[in-house]
Image (cartoon, rainbow, N blue to C red):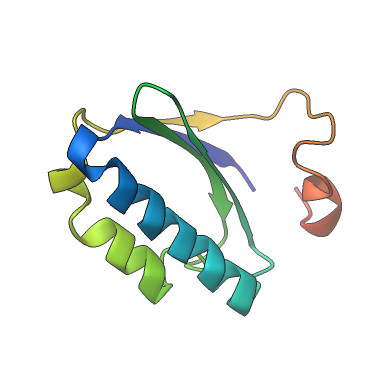
Amino acid sequence: MGYNLIRYGVKDESIAQNRTLVAKVFEALDETKPQSVRYLVLELENGEFIHLVSQDGDGLTGLDAFKAFSADHAARRATPLARSPAKIVGDYRMLAGADAAVPA
């Protein structure tokens, strides 16, 4: 299972909305508990969001909350999406159990 790093800036007036939509995605993940999904979202002080995601199938993208997050995403962005494959080189207690729960 590989990872993708996705980075984008959000318009100042849309930061709260983006944050709320991301929170709803995590609520849906907590409810459905898809074992094939690894997902981390960071918000930087400058209005950028960074997503680190790994999934087999559509465990994340198939969620209604993720579809709502994606629906008007382009209108909320201040910068284009920058997406690139990523490998976790080291992890100390940040992504606890990521390798144990899902075989690589």
In the picture provided, is 22 more to the left or to the right than 3?
left
Q: Is residue 9 visible?
A: yes
Which residue is at the far left? 75
Q: Tell me what residue is drawn at x 78 percent, y 24 percent.
A: 90
Q: Tell me what residue is drawn at x 77 percent, y 48 percent.
A: 98
Position in image of residue 72 (x %, y %): 17, 56
Q: How many marks?
A: 0
Position in image of residue 96 (x %, y %): 82, 45
Q: Tell me what residue is drawn at x 29 percent, y 67 percent.
A: 68
Q: Is residue 11 visible?
A: no
Tell which of 47 and 66 is nearer to you.
47
Tell which of 6 and 68 is nearer to you.
68
In the picture provided, is 81 more to the left or to the right than 38?
left
In the picture provided, is 67 more to the left or to the right than 13?
right
Position in image of residue 31 (x %, y %): 61, 78
Tell which of 8 and 55 is nearer to you.
8
Q: Tell me what residue is drawn at x 50 percent, y 38 percent.
A: 4
- For residue 67, above or below residue 74: below
Tell which of 34 and 24 is nearer to you.
24
